[in-house]
Image (spheres, helix red, strand yellow):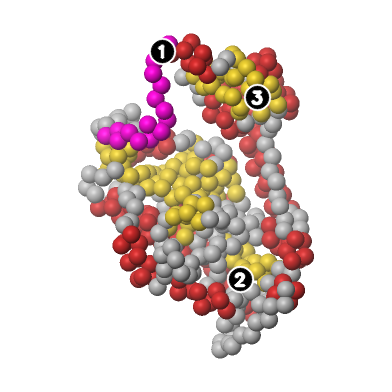
């Protein structure tokens, strides 16, 4: 295998290290400047705008709301981020040293420099030669015709062997159907994931399920619904989790009941904790001359309105519910991982771990990608090591009629009209009928809370 690079950051270069030979364009650049993390805090900005974030959380390391509530990191937050950066740095140095046959101390020096032009990368043995793409491939493969990567993706690839369902949980976990949000990107809808799990469980030709998780979390309710369905699926056939870049908070919640869990060394996982809150915008409205009047019946009718912060009673009520949920979260992890609850509590507290750290903490069974997960599947279904497997997806897109019917049953709308469905009247009044977010998402607040691949 030959990897040709014109520019390589740390990610591209790490991928190229899997090749037998690395070729860099003569005027190409290799940029491997170690690891870093930036923490942004918007409390000061929000204050200038007349907005205040009011959040309640469980777990010393459950730091997602701090971006909105603080002007600097807490010590637990800083400790956690420093640990993650150090782990990623060590993994990068070790990977380069191993695959390029270099001493780790020497690689650490190269990473300290970070930036290399073509001549510098060649002299440092980060690449094998400098050449243009066509010439590099002709040297290794002659005049063989290349196949574009997208053709592999479009290939039906029926193959042979036991059929294994591949179910993905990608993006923020929400109730309802999977889709894509303008602000937060992909959304893993509980209805969609549950339907795919049921299809796989009921299909007698499916031997096992691989759940591919790439999610920072989301709705606690949606996560719990998926968690329950995974437990039901396990009564019919094995379930193995393969973690991608993220499987944190709700992403770990849905993974924990699986028969086996595998993560990449740099996967961000764990974050066993919870938070909920709201934005208080009343000073902003005063600044812009917006006056609102509320007609209220019920002491906590405005609990999640953006008209003020939580009062002491509301904060205590919310904290109590979050504490209870956190206890159930820890208990479910303990049951799924067959660990003592005290051992889970010691690695919980909202702390994020790398995949390698998660193995040591007992949250993950081993390191590796989809191939490692499939190897575990072979063992669970009694197949020979290396036996061929066929990955089957159940991601049929609903028809327009099905989407309209689904939305109508929920009291919502499709494409036009209110994007909030039955909650529009609450949105208009500044109220919300439920906490906007329970577990981690890309934002502290969510609006709604290599085998062949075939399709059945």
- Name which residue lies at 26% across and 45% down: 456
Foreground residue among 317 and 165? 165
Please state if 149 lies on the left or on the right of 120 as rendered: left
Residue at 47%, 43% (x, y): give it. Answer: 243
Is residue 262 visible in the rendered image? The answer is yes
Q: Position of residue 328 (x, y in %)?
A: 50, 63
Mark 2 lies on residue? 319
Magenta-drawn stretch contains 94: no
On residue 288, which mark appears? none
Q: Which residue is mark 1?
A: 143
Distance, label 2 to label 1, CA atoms, is 67 Å
Disc 3 from disc 2: Cα separation? 51 Å
Q: List the residue tagged with mark 3.
A: 29
Quick check: is 151 in the magenta stretch?
Answer: yes
Is residue 213 or residue 94 the one in the foreground? 213
Q: Position of residue 412 (x, y in %)?
A: 42, 70
Question: In the structure shown, which secondary structural element does the residue marked by tag 3 occupy?
Answer: strand
Res 162 quadrant in image: top left
């Amino acid at each position: 295998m030959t990897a040709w690079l014109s520019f390589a950051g740390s990610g591209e270069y790490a991928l190229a290290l899997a090749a037998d030979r690395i070729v860099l364009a003569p005027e190409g650049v290799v940029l491997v400047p170690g690891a870093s993390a930036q923490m942004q805090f918007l409390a000061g900005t929000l204050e200038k705008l007349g907005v205040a974030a009011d959040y309640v959380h469980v777990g010393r390391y459950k730091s997602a709301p701090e971006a909105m509530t603080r002007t600097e990191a807490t010590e637990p937050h800083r400790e956690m981020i420093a640990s993650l950066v150090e782990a990623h740095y060590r993994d990068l140095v070790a990977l380069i040293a191993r695959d390029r046959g270099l001493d780790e101390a020497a690689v650490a020096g190269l990473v300290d420099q970070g930036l290399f032009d073509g001549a510098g990368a060649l002299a440092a043995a980060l690449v094998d030669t400098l050449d243009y793409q066509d010439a590099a491939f002709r040297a290794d493969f002659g005049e063989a015709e290349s196949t574009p990567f997208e053709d592999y993706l479009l290939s039906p690839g029926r193959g042979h062997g036991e059929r294994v369902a591949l179910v993905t949980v990608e993006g923020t976990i929400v109730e309802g159907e999977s889709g894509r949000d303008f602000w937060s990107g992909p959304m893993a809808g509980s209805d969609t994931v549950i339907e795919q799990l049921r299809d796989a469980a009921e299909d007698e030709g499916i031997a096992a399920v691989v759940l591919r998780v790439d999610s920072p979390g989301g709705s606690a309710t949606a996560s719990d619904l998926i968690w329950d369905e995974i437990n039901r699926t396990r009564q019919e056939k094995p379930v193995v989790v393969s973690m991608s870049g993220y499987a944190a908070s709700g992403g770990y919640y849905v993974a924990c009941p699986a028969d086996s869990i595998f993560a990449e060394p740099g996967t961000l996982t764990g974050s066993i904790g919870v938070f909920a809150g709201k934005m208080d915008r009343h000073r902003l409205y005063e600044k812009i001359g917006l006056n609102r009047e509320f007609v209220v019946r019920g002491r906590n009718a405005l609990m999640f309105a953006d008209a003020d912060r939580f009062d002491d009673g509301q904060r205590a009520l919310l904290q109590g519910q979050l504490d209870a949920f956190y206890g159930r979260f820890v208990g479910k992890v303990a049951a799924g991982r067959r660990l003592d609850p005290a051992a889970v509590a010691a690695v919980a507290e909202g702390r994020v771990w790398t995949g390698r750290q998660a193995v040591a903490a007992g949250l993950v069974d081993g390191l590796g990608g989809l191939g490692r997960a499939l190897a575990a599947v072979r063992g669970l279904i009694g197949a020979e090591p290396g036996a061929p497997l066929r990955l089957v997806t159940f991601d049929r897109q609903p028809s327009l009629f099905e989407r309209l019917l689904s939305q109508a049953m929920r009291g919502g709308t499709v494409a036009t009209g209110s994007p909030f469905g039955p909650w529009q009247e609450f949105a208009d009044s500044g109220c919300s009928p439920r906490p906007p977010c329970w577990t981690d998402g890309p934002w502290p607040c969510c609006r709604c809370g290599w085998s062949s691949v075939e399709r059945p």
